[in-house]
Amino acid sequence: MPDDMGINNNVVVAENLVKHFPINLSGIFKKKWIVVKAVDGINFSVKQGECFGLVGESGSGKSTTAYMIVGMYEPTSGSLVFKGEDIARPAVKRPMHLKKNIQIVFQDPGSSLNPRRNIKNILEMPLRVHNMIKKGDSIEKRVVDLLDMVELPSHYRFKSPITIGGGERQMVAIARALATEPSFMVLDEPTSALDVSIQGKIINKLMRLQKELNLTYLFITHDLSLMRNVATRIAIMYLGKIVEIASAIEFFQKPLHPYTQMLLSSIPILFEEEAKLKPDKIHSIGEIPSPVDVPPGCSFNTRCPFKTDICLVEDPVMREIEPEHYARCHNI
């Protein structure tokens, strides 16, 4: 377990966090339950003011982790703490100040914004729910200020989300998240549903807002090349477990886990200088196991070219290999 868990500047701390989904496959003649181990005992902390990157392939448990933090899912077990307060419970059972301080920007603004409401109505809702209108101010002015914050014209408040572009919709979603003046934001692949030409603008705006508003981010993505430019620290998830945590600089200069090395070696390059920074090409073998049937031992053993006998029977624990650099592997 990372030893920075006890430092006072931690905003979010997760210890042995688990989320399992039981699924009923019973038929007429047979009863059967299976368990999807979406998140299976992870430990991490997010420090004040940083952008903590959570990276992994589809199905690794990234979004499930995010949804537990914002209260959409209740953890099966484990500890989840926000600024010293227990948040291991659904959002409906959380006090209002926690709901106000923890906000999320979803992957697809097309589905996260109500198409039957105009942008003014969408931005007014959190302002009214959390009583964010200050004395002598008007809700109209606050809506205009939020649009200005994300560089959208004031007349956009009369538009419907379906009449504007995907990048503009995501800016509205960011403005909605900022309406409650949060201190912590979860960014769940906020650019993956957008055109490449728009992604850079969204990322730059998010980074500027972080500095201007002193925000802390949990940034979820499958794009490691994006993390090089925005993350303070990075955690890699695989089949519900975190396999490596390091500072962004250390992570790209000296990846330790075979899965991390495999991901980094697959990043496309444009210049020879970039090629020199990449680890040697690692080819994974086998297929990604199902979270319903995770292999015994190390969950990466079905794809790891460096596996040994112990990897087949014993699940490795997270160890600090170098200062502030942690990995789950028997062979490091």
Image (cartoon, grey):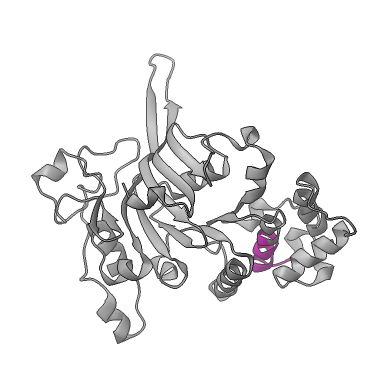
Establish if 211 lies above or below 47.
below
- Occupied quadrant, residue 284: bottom left
Along the viewing direction, whichever of 171 and 14 lies nearer the viewer: 14
At horizontal 87% and vertical 55% (from top left) the residue drawn is: 135
Residue extending furthest left? Answer: 309
How many numbered discs?
Answer: 0
**Magenta highlight on residue 330:** no
User: Residue 230's spot in the image, x, y percent?
Assistant: 47, 69
- Quarter of the figure that contains the C terminus: bottom left
**Magenta highlight on residue 165:** yes
- Occupied quadrant, residue 95: top right
**Can the viewer see residue 157 in this picture?**
no
Q: Is residue 169 left or right of residue 285?
A: right
Residue extending furthest bottom? Answer: 272
Residue extending furthest top? Answer: 29
Along the viewing direction, whichever of 142 and 297 lies nearer the viewer: 142
User: Residue 2's spot in the image, x, y percent?
Assistant: 33, 50
**Can the viewer see residue 273 in this picture?**
yes
Classified by dominant secondary structure, the portion drawn in magenta counts as helix
Along the viewing direction, whichever of 165 and 9 lies nearer the viewer: 9
Establish if 174 lies above or below 318.
below
At horizontal 36% and vertical 82% (from top left) the residue drawn is: 270
User: Residue 272's spot in the image, x, y percent?
Assistant: 29, 86
Residue extending furthest front? Answer: 8
At horizontal 72% and vertical 56% (from top left) the residue drawn is: 179
Along the viewing direction, whichever of 125 and 286 lies nearer the viewer: 125
User: Residue 232's spot in the image, x, y percent?
Assistant: 43, 66
Establish if 167 lies above or below 117.
below
- The magenta span reads 164-174
Q: Is residue 163 left or right of residue 263?
A: right
